[in-house]
Amino acid sequence: MYMSYGLSVVIVFLIGVSLYFLAHDPPTWVYLTAVPTIVIFFNSFAFQVRAGHDAVFLWECFL
């Protein structure tokens, strides 16, 4: 549970900062659309990694 929350916080921060600098502070709807979409996408892979109970890196889910 704490891993999922921590990962979500990091993703929200990184996406927010990236959108601010790369898109030059877009409208609020862009943040409200991009952040939840990316959090849901990356958390689904994080759960797959943790379910394996071994040291699997996130990029190995794509192999």
Image (tube, rainbow, N blue to C red):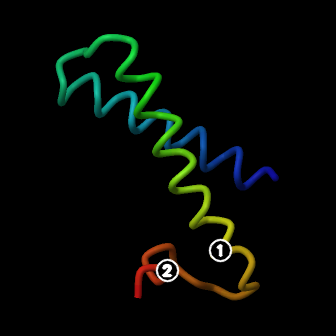
Q: Could you tell me the amino acid type at mark 1?
A: Gln
Residue carrying label 1: 48
Query: Mark 2–mark 1 contact, CB under 8 Å?
Result: yes
Sequence-first tag of 2 and 1? 1
Q: Quadrant of the C terminus?
A: bottom left
- The spot of residue 52 in percent (x, y) is 71, 85
Q: Secondary structure at mark 2?
A: helix
The amino acid on which the numbered mark 2 sits, given as a three-letter code, is Cys
Q: Quick one: label 1, few (<14), some, or many (20+) residues within 10 Å?
A: few
Gap in angstroms between the C-alphas marked 2 and 1: 8 Å
The residue positioned 40% from the left and 33% from the top of the image is 34
Q: Which residue is mark 2?
A: 61
**What residue appears at the point 18 percent right and 30 percent down from the top-left corner?**
22
**Label 2 crowd bin: few (<14), some (14–19), many (20+), radius 10 Å:** few
Q: Residue at x 70, y 88 (%)?
A: 54
**Is 24 displayed left or right of 11 in the figure?**
left
Residue 11 location, x and y as percent?
49, 43
Seen in the picture, residue 26 relative to 60 is either above or below; the reply is above
Q: Nearer the viewer, residue 19 or 55?
A: 19
Place of residue 39 in the rendered image (x, y in percent of width and height, measured from the top left) = 54, 45
